[in-house]
Image (cartoon, helix red, strand yellow):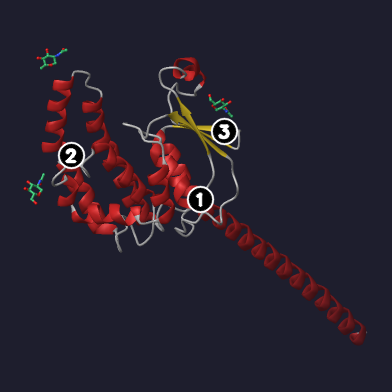
Amino acid sequence: MGKGRAEGSSCRVTIGTAFVLCFLAILIAVGVGLIVHFSENRKFECVFPGIRSGDPTGQTTQEHSYKLFYFDWRGRGELSRMMFTAVGQSFVDRRIDFFKEWPGIKYTMPQYVVPVLEVDGRTNITQSMAITRYLARQFGMYGKNAQEMALVDQIIETVVDIFSGVLKFQETPNATERARVKAEFYKENCPKYLQFLENIVAEGGRDNFAVGDGLTLADLALHVYIEHTEAHVTPSDRPLLNNYTRLAENRRNTERIPKIRDYLANRPHTDL
Ligand SMILES: *[C@@H]1O[C@H](CO)[C@@H](O)[C@H](O)[C@H]1NC(C)=O
Ligand SMILES: *[C@@H]1O[C@H](CO)[C@@H](O)[C@H](O)[C@H]1NC(C)=O
Ligand SMILES: *[C@@H]1O[C@H](CO)[C@@H](O)[C@H](O)[C@H]1NC(C)=O
């Protein structure tokens, strides 16, 4: 009897142990599953905002097809063209004739304005800086971390400010009046914003890059929007840009990039 009871209890112990082991195995499996699940989600989150590596070659991005709608001007479209150029990404550069074509297609555009970027023939992105930020994420040109991204953003917002000063004189029809507005711009707003930009580059840029130690959206934005101010050629004997050594050197640095140099030498010449 005693023996039988002993055997029975050892059997119960074995079943109990099996239950405990089973329970532990399930806990471990669920735990591993959760870890895998979250690490995959983290990886996805890291890839999407494009903090990837700052690698401007674009080699690691998926292939997409791009069509840029803009006028036959540099204006608000040129920065996107420069980004495609810098990474060697082909795109359709649809240049719209402002006088002949635009009235006919204006109201087919999502916000009745260009630039518009069509991606894979499926999505249209409107607003020039939304387009360039999207491309910067796709191409790994938005900086390597949150701090660099904030510096890139500060440069973007400041060139938008400087461009509103440019538009003031470009949109003044009377030539005498235009010359007056432009002279005022060079005395007040242009030096002010160039100094702000110089400070940002001095704070966050290394090796003649605007932000961090590699090519980002910021370098190309500075190149395009300073060209809109004409501060790199005005006055012709001692251009204003030369007063800002970091910006001037950054501009030369950008122009030394072979793909950019070739593009600048061969692109259509336009006044705006
Ligand atoms: C994008 O806009 C262009 C120009 O209006 C239009 O031809 C095209 O159909 C649009 N594509 C999409 C996916 O909306
Ligand atoms: C242009 O502006 C100047 C100075 O304000 C003025 O004297 C001149 O009449 C204007 N010209 C035209 C064509 O409106
Ligand atoms: C730029 O520098 C020159 C001398 O190198 C100076 O005469 C000029 O006032 C400066 N311009 C500005 C806007 O600071």
Give the side of residue 203 with respect to residue 129, left or right. left
Give the side of residue 137 with respect to residue 215, left or right. right
In which image quadrant can residue 60 be found?
Answer: bottom right
Q: Residues within 10 Å of mark 2 (few under 14, many from 20)?
A: many
Disc 1 marks which residue? Answer: 88
Residue 27 visible in this rendered orientation of the protein: yes
Q: Which of the two labelled residues, at mark 3 and mark 1, occupies the earlier sequence position?
A: 1
* x, y percent for residue 263: 42, 46
Disc 2 marks which residue? Answer: 190
CB at mark 1 closer than 8 A to ligand 1? no
* x, y percent for residue 67: 53, 35
Name the amino acid type tagged 3: Thr
Where disc 2 sits, the SS reads: helix
CB at mark 3 closer than 8 A to ligand 1? yes
Residue 188 visible in this rendered orientation of the protein: no
Please say if 126 is above or below 7: above
Give the side of residue 20 with respect to residue 152, left or right. right
* x, y percent for residue 189: 16, 37
Disc 3 marks which residue? Answer: 123
Please say if 138 is above or below 271: below
Where disc 1 sits, the SS reads: loop
In which image quadrant can residue 184 be found?
Answer: top left
Q: Residue at x 48, y 51 (%)?
A: 87
Tell me whether circle 2 and circle 3 mark residues in contact (CB < 8 Å): no
Name the amino acid type tagged 2: Cys
* x, y percent for residue 9: 84, 79
Q: Extreme bottom residue here?
A: 3
Spatial CA span between label 3 and label 1: 22 Å
